[in-house]
Image (tube, rainbow, N blue to C red):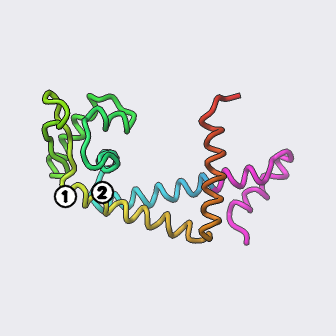
Amino acid sequence: MTDRVDLHVRRWLPVLPDLDPDVEGAVTRMQFLTRHLRAVKDQALADLDLQEKEFGTLHALAGRGGRAAPSEIAADLGMAPASITARVDGLLRRDFVRRIPSAVDRRRVDVELTDAGRAAWLRAMDVVGGEEHRLLGALAPDERRLLSDLLRRVLMVAEGPVG
């Protein structure tokens, strides 16, 4: 089987004779797949009338069991805690979250997913997850495991020191 990346590699080999076709093929395929999944996610969010930042905040909350301090949400999203207030306010207006007193600190207010917020998050996850399963359905379960293990090794190098 030949895909568009095979054609890309064939086009560049005469220009860059030292090009490793396996490295170029793997990296280019990962880039195409990332773009494809991004486009599917963007379309799903648009269809569901969800902004990326809303989805990200709902996702962070869902990943913490549906309830978290704004500082915890900020940490999960790699943002300054003060930046979360506007996001939470927008989600409050849509009835996707509510503010509730903290169970561990009376001075703190936590953010909790509402049923509507959980439903909106799940609808988006169904679309994105469905496409991920469709794509990786081209592989047998043991092949998916192998791919995941191989990508883990590559990611560990990327996360390590450069050089």
Q: Which residue is mark 2?
A: 121
Give the left or right position of residue 76, taking residue 18 as reference: left
Compared with 62, 108 (above or below) is above
In the depicted view, which residue is nearer to us: 149 or 95? 149
- From the viewer's perspective, is the residue at label 2 or at label 1 nearer? 1
Q: Amino acid at mark 2?
A: Trp
Residue found at the very far front of the displayed protein = 104
Measuring 30% from the left and 57% from the top, which residue is drawn there? 121
Whichever of callouts 2 and 1 sits on the residue coming sooner in the sequence is: 1
The residues colored magenta run 1-29
| C-alpha separation, residue under disc 2 versus residue under disc 1 | 10 Å
Give the left or right position of residue 63, taking residue 99 as reference: right
- Mark 1: secondary structure: helix
Measuring 46% from the left and 58% from the top, which residue is drawn there? 39
Compared with 30, 7 (above or below) is below
Residue 157: % across, % down: 66, 38
Quick one: label 1, few (<14), some, or many (20+) residues within 10 Å? few
Residue 126 figure quarter: bottom left
Q: Which residue is mark 1?
A: 115
In the rendered view of the protein, which quadrant contains the N terminus? bottom right
- Mark 2: secondary structure: helix
Residue 25 figure quarter: bottom right
Residue 94: % across, % down: 16, 51
Give the left or right position of residue 74, taking residue 135 as reference: left
Residue 57 figure quarter: top left
Measuring 59% from the left and 36% from the top, which residue is drawn there? 159
Q: Amino acid at mark 1?
A: Asp
